Image (cartoon, rainbow, N blue to C red):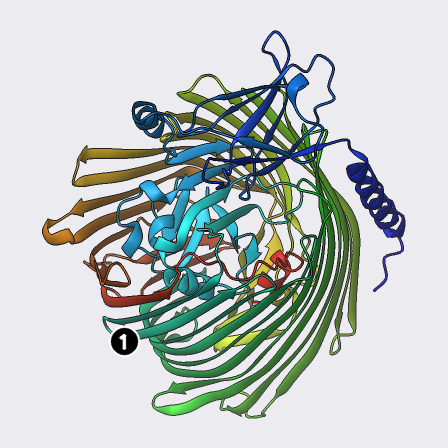
């Protein structure tokens, strides 16, 4: 790897990391521990250091072991004050504290009346506002024991779940998913399937990071936090789902976790088998012709995945981690279509197309992690990830005219991608006031794509032709980031972050001898502010600038055909797009959330249509400016003790400008979810989705509807959960988009699987709250998603 313009930047960051480590160890902090009369530790309690005027001059929070650190040698320090749920308030004079280290402070249990009062007021709120993120505490959510992570995300504020497309977005942004701060290492709909099998009963809370710190390259992050258990042991969760509509869908998964004093081991295996039918029409019109196509397709998708992770705890300060994950699959596609082309010069021709495909994919990831915990507030983390993937496939396109073969072509592809990333991160809490995160990242990406397109039969030109190209692409990124956050008071807190990136790319097409190089430097600032007006009103303001690089496939200039009149090709000259967003959120009673946001994207990667004689070619280019004003509301409502609902509404005004092209229009989405407690502990849930977007990129899109219902019940002391679910009950989900570009009118209509009905069973063994390995690998984040 070669980073000539970035060496100084990386050296400075590394020196800063080492310097901060020395500062952290030099702090004069006093260690302490909170216990009760039964010698049990008391976790997550705030310890305040106050002066004679009862003004807070420092504070600390005990960890899960009840331990804390605080700097007692402060001017005018008078008392330590500790208030914990279920315990009497403890006031400890500084002058009376023993000189021994650590301090051991014992809290006395409160009276029964006091406990009842505190318990009611101290219950975790459903929604909590934090710097740059929202905490969704799922323990207050109905049906949590029989829900999946996908079900819970559908109730989370600002999250939109599309069950048909199997995608999840947070405030309209693409999401990076983490589990306990760790990547899932799965891609596309594989992430959706994994989350659909993830049991809600094992989840403590979900972090919705709509304005991520400078550490992350993603525009939005969702981190699922599982329940913690101090004890060691093992657990196993087995899950299977069978569904049927027009075609069957079967999936299954199993997870095993084990932990003791020295190791933590996790493994998960899963498989999915489904058939996806699609039927629809496309229409094209220009000045001298019209084309109408009707198609029916069926895709058979077989995929499997496995993940193995191991943590080794050398001692209390040093942890080594190893992760290996693999995903493999095969997609068989078969499509029949009829094309009616009416030309002014030659009249009407009717073609029949039969397109078949057989594509295999393999994706592997190997990760090594090391964490050094200097103290309770500071740690150094190193991550090294290597990912490699391969897509190998054959697609055949046969066109007939008057029941005679008119053209027979075959496309062979071989796509290889390799990504190597290394990160170094340092976290510390300086002077118990300033949370600091600083780090550096180096990434090397190599892709090698081979395409071969051969015409076996051509009754028009008579002469078979052969086109082939090898496209090689390399990308080197050097990045450094710094985040600093602090609480100026109990009401006001702030976070400032800056990410610096230097990128070098080279793309080479062997057949055209085209070599294209880019080199650019970016500064990506992020700011988050939080202000608590009072116990009922909280305001949060976030600003960020992020980068989105094009996927590897869209950079490949090779052209391939889907039929005799339609083709697509990539663009090696594509540049990154940049998004600036600012959002103001109002949290009311830690329950309701209202958001007003503005988003602006420059150079978005969009498809456009062009003509090459009789062929319509879809290409990629950077659009000028896409902007949107958005307002949304999240409103949970408890109508009765047995009926709870969650309503989400979002409205937006969109605008797109590029050269002389300009388009604008409104967008609206409405999601509702109602849960019902039925007799004999049965539960039911009814949800509805409505989405209307007047403009999506270059397209005008028709409204989308969907209704879903489920019934669930737990058995065997909640070890066995069963659910019956109906998705898109009335088969209303449709895709309808149209556009006009370069004098070409294009319209597409299609529908997918329609109504689907699923039966899911989940069985849990062992201690269901034992956590698996915690090895964290953040190095590949967005890069792995670009392999698709």
Residue at image coords 39%, 47%: 160
Residue placed most toward the observer, 131 or 282: 131
Q: Position of residue 35 (x, y in %)?
A: 51, 36
Q: Position of residue 415 (x, y in %)?
A: 62, 77
**SS at mark 1 in the image:** strand
Residue placed most toward the observer, 387 or 567: 387
The answer, for residue 48, to whether it is visible in the render is yes
Viewed as shown, does residue 703 lie left or right of 166?
A: left
Q: Position of residue 488 (x, y in %)?
A: 63, 20
Q: Quadrant of the N terminus?
A: bottom right
Residue at image coords 30%, 58%: 734
Q: Quadrant of the C terminus?
A: bottom right
Q: How many marks?
A: 1
Residue 535: image quadrant is top left
The answer to whether 551 is drawn above or below residue 62 in the figure is below
The answer to whether 114 is drawn above or below residue 694 in the figure is above
The answer to whether 681 is drawn above or below residue 638 in the figure is below
Viewed as shown, does residue 492 lie left or right of 135?
A: right
Residue at image coords 33%, 36%: 649
Read off the residue under disc 1.
248
Viewed as shown, does residue 548 lie left or right of 270?
A: right
Viewed as shown, does residue 444 lie left or right of 39?
A: right
The answer, for residue 500, to whether it is visible in the render is no
Residue at image coords 47%, 51%: 228
Residue placed most toward the observer, 47 or 788: 47
């Amino acid at each position: 790897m070669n980073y000539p313009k970035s060496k100084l930047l990386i050296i400075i960051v590394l020196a800063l990391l080492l310097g901060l480590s020395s500062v952290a160890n030099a702090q004069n902090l006093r260690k302490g521990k909170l216990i009760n009369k039964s010698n049990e530790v008391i976790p997550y309690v705030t310890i305040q250091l106050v002066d004679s005027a009862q003004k807070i001059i420092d504070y600390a929070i005990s960890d899960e072991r009840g331990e804390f650190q605080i700097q007692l040698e402060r001017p005018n320090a008078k008392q330590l004050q500790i208030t914990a749920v279920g315990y009497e308030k403890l006031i400890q004079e500084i002058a009376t504290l023993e000189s021994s280290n650590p301090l051991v402070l014992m809290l006395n249990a409160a009276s029964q009346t006091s406990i009842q009062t505190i318990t009611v007021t101290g219950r975790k709120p459903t929604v909590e506002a934090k710097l740059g993120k929202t905490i969704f505490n799922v323990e207050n959510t109905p049906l949590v024991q029989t829900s999946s992570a996908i079900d819970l995300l559908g109730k989370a504020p600002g999250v939109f779940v599309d069950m048909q497309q199997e995608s999840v977005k947070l405030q309209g942004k693409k999401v990076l998913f983490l589990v306990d701060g760790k990547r899932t290492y799965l891609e596309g709909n594989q992430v959706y399937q994994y989350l659909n099998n993830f049991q809600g009963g094992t989840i403590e809370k979900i972090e919705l990071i709509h304005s991520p710190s400078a550490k992350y390259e993603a525009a939005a992050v969702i981190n699922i936090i599982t329940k913690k258990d101090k004890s060691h042991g093992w657990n196993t969760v087995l899950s299977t789902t069978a569904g049927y509509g027009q075609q069957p869908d079967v999936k299954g998964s199993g997870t095993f976790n084990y932990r003791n004093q020295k190791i933590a081991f996790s493994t998960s295996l899963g498989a999915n088998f489904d058939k996806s039918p699609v039927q629809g029409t496309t229409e094209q019109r220009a000045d001298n012709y019209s084309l109408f196509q009707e198609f029916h397709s069926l895709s058979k998708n077989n995929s499997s995945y496995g993940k193995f992770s191991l943590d080794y705890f050398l001692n209390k300060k040093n942890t080594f981690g190893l992760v290996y994950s693999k995903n493999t699959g095969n997609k068989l596609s078969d499509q029949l279509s009829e094309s009616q082309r009416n030309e002014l010069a030659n009249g009407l021709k009717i073609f029949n197309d039969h397109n078949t495909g057989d594509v295999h994919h393999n994706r592997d990831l190997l990760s090594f992690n090391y964490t050094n915990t200097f103290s309770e507030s500071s740690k150094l983390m190193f991550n090294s990830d290597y990912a490699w993937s391969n897509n190998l496939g054959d697609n055949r396109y046969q066109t007939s005219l008057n029941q005679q073969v008119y053209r027979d072509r075959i496309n062979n592809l071989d796509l290889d991608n390799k990504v190597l990333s290394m990160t170094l991160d340092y976290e510390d809490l300086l002077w118990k006031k300033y949370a600091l995160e600083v780090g550096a990242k180096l990434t090397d990406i190599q892709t090698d794509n081979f395409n071969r397109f051969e015409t076996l039969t051509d009754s028009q030109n008579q002469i078979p032709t052969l086109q082939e190209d090898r496209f090689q692409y390399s990308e080197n990124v050097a990045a450094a980031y710094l985040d600093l956050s602090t609480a100026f008071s109990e009401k006001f807190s702030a976070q400032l972050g800056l990410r610096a990136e230097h990128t070098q790319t080279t793309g080479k097409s062997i057949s055209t001898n085209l070599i294209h190089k880019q080199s650019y430097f970016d500064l990506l600032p992020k700011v988050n502010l939080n202000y608590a007006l009072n116990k009922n009103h909280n305001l949060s303001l976030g600003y960020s600038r992020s980068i989105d690089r094009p996927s590897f496939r869209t950079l490949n200039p090779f052209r391939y055909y889907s039929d005799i009149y339609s083709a697509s090709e990539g663009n090696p000259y594509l540049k990154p797009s940049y998004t600036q967003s600012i959002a103001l959120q109002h949290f009311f009673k830690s329950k309701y959330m209202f958001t007003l946001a503005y988003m602006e994207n420059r150079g978005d990667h969009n498809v456009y249509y062009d003509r090459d004689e009789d062929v319509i070619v879809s290409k990629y280019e950077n659009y000028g400016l896409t902007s949107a004003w958005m307002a949304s509301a999240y409103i949970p409502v408890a109508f009765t003790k047995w009926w709870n609902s969650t309503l989400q509404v979002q409205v937006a005004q969109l605008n797109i400008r590029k050269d002389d092209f300009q388009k604008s229009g409104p967008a609206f989405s409405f999601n509702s979810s109602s849960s019902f407690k039925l007799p004999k502990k049965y539960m039911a849930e009814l949800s509805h989705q409505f989405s209307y977007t007047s403009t999506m990129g270059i397209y005008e899109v028709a409204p989308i509807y969907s209704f879903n219902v489920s019934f669930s019940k737990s058995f065997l002391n909640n070890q066995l959960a069963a659910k019956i679910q109906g998705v898109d009950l009335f088969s209303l989900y449709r895709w309808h988009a149209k556009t006009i570009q370069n004098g070409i009118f294009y319209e597409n209509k299609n529908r997918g699987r329609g109504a689907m009905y699923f039966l899911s069973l989940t069985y849990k063994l062992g201690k269901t709250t034992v956590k698996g390995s915690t090895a964290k690998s953040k190095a590949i984040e967005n890069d792995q998603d670009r392999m698709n």
